[in-house]
Amino acid sequence: MGRENFGNRFGVLVAMAGSAVGLGNLWRFPYLAGTNGGAAFILLYLVFVFILCIPVMYSEFLIGRRSGANAIGAFKTLAPGSKWGIVGLLGVLASISILAFYSVVGGWTIDYMVKAFQFRFTVTDNAVLEGMFAESISSVYEPLLYTAVFLALTAFVVLAGVKNGIEKYTKVMMPLLFLLVIIVAIRSVTLPGAAAGISFLFKPDFSAITTDTVLDALGQAFFSLSLGCGCVITYGSYVKKDEHIMKTSAMTAAADTLFALIAGLAVMPAVFAFGISPSEGPGLVFITLPHIFAQIPFGGVLAILFFFILFIAAITSSISLLEVVVAYLSEEFRIKRAWSVFAGVAGVACLSVLCSLSQGVLADVRIFGLNFFDFFDKLSANIFMPLGGFLIVIFVGYKLGRKAFESELTNDGKLRVATWLLNFTFFSIKYITPLAIGVIMLNGLL
C-alpha cells in the first residue's frame, strides 16, 4: 500500500502549523491564561515550549520520518518485537480523547458562524451574550447537529488524502487566519480600558502560580503543539527525506507561539474593557469576541469572516488528529482509507455525544469530579500527551540513540547543523526533558 507525501516544504510547514495552530490558541489559551493568573502562566508556557516541547517535537518528527509509518507502526518498525508500540497506542488514545471534546467546540464554531451570518452580534450586553452562549451549548439537539457537521467536514478533508486534502486546504487558510486574528487584536488593544488586559497578559504575578498552573501550562504547551498525540509522528511520516526537521519544527513552534500571543491580545484586553471576568472559562472567546464585533465598523462582516476562520483553525487541527486514527487503522489492519475514516469518526462521535450532553442534560454525571467534556480535556492534555512525550524522548534518547538522532536531523550528514546544537538537543532529549516532564506530572498527581 503506497503512502502519500507532502508536496513541498511550504506544504509541510503549513500542515504542521495547521495541526498546531487552532482552537488550542484561540479558544483554550486565553481562558487558561485567564484562570491561571495571566502573565505568570504565559511565561511558564513559553519556557515549556522552547525548553521541553521543541525537543519532543524533534523526537516525534524523527520517529515519523525515519519509520515512514503510523503512530503505532512507527515503533514496531524502529523497535520490532518490543513493547514500545504502547507509546504509539497512547498517541492514538490521546487523539481520540481530544477529538471527543474538540469536535464539540468545533461544532460551537459552526453554530457561531451561522449566528454571524444572521448578524446577531450587534449587542454589548454581557448578560445577553452569556445567555446566548449558555443556551447554545446546553440544549440537546442543536449542538449535536453542529458537532456531526464538524466531524463530517473533517472526514471529508481526511478522505481526500494528504496532498489533496490536508495540504491543499491549509495552504490557503493558515495565512488568512493569521491576518484576521491580527486585525481583531489591533481593535481589541485600542478599546477603552484595554490597558488592564494588556498588563494582565504581560505583567506577571508569580504569587498566582500553583501546581495546577504549572500542570496546565505544560498541558497547554503539549496541546497547542499537538505533541504526544501521534500527530507529529504521523505527519512526519509523510515528509520527504530532504526536509530539515530542526528548521521545520522550530518554525512551527515559533508560529504557534506567536499566534497564541496574538490570540491572547485579541481576547484578553477586550475582557477587561467590557468588565468580563478573565476566569470566565471555556466560553470566553464566544462571549468576548462578539463584544468586539459590535464596536467595529462593518463588525458584522468581520464576525462572519472570523468565525469562519475559527472554524478553519479548528478543522486544520481536527484533521491531523483524525489522520492519526485513520493512518493507524488503514495501515495496521489493511483496510481501505474510506472505511478507516468512517470507523474513526463513528468512534469519536459516540464520545462527542457524551461531551456535548455534559454541558446540559448530563451535567451532573461526573468522572473523578469532572463532567465528560472536562474529563476528556484533562485526560488528554494533562496525562496522555505529557506521558506520551515523556516516553517518546526516552525512546529516542535511550533506544534509538545518538547515531540515529544525528543521522535523521542532519539528513545523513547532508545538512550542516552546529555541533553544540546537536549536543545540547540530544542532552535535553536524554536528560532534561524527561526529568522535567516526570517531576511536573508527579507533582500534579500527588
Image (tube, helix red, strand yellow):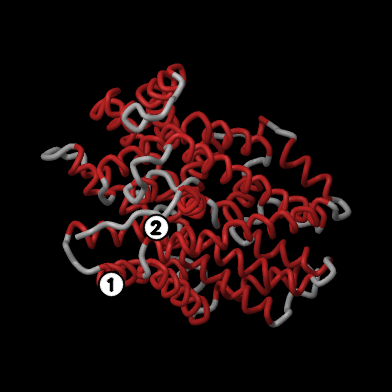
Find residue 119 and report its image quarter: bottom right
Assess whether mark 2 and mark 1 are in contact (beta carbons under 8 angstroms): no
Q: Is residue 5 left or right of residue 46?
A: left
Inter-mark Cα distance, 1 to 2: 16 Å
Count of numbered circles in the view: 2
Query: The C terminus lies in which quarter of the figure?
Result: top left
Question: Going 40% across and 61% down the picture, which residue do you hit?
Answer: 163
Q: Examine the image and state in which quarter residue 257 appears.
A: top right
- Disc 2: which residue: 321
Horizontal and vertical percent for residue 389? 37, 38
Q: Is residue 179 above or below residue 111?
A: above
Residue extending farthest right: 192
Query: Dot 1, how many residues are within 10 Å of its Cα: few (below 14), some (14-19), or many (20+)?
Result: some
Residue 130: x percent and y percent? 69, 68
Circle number at residue 338: 1
Say above or below: 354 vs 392. below
Q: Amino acid at mark 1?
A: Ala
Of the pair 430 and 248, the residue shown nearer to us? 248
Q: Is residue 82 above or below residue 51?
A: below
Q: Give above or below for 135 relative to 239.
A: below
Q: Earlier in the sequence, mark 1 or mark 2?
A: 2
Kind of residue sitting beneath label 2: Leu
Position in image of residue 18 (x %, y %): 50, 55
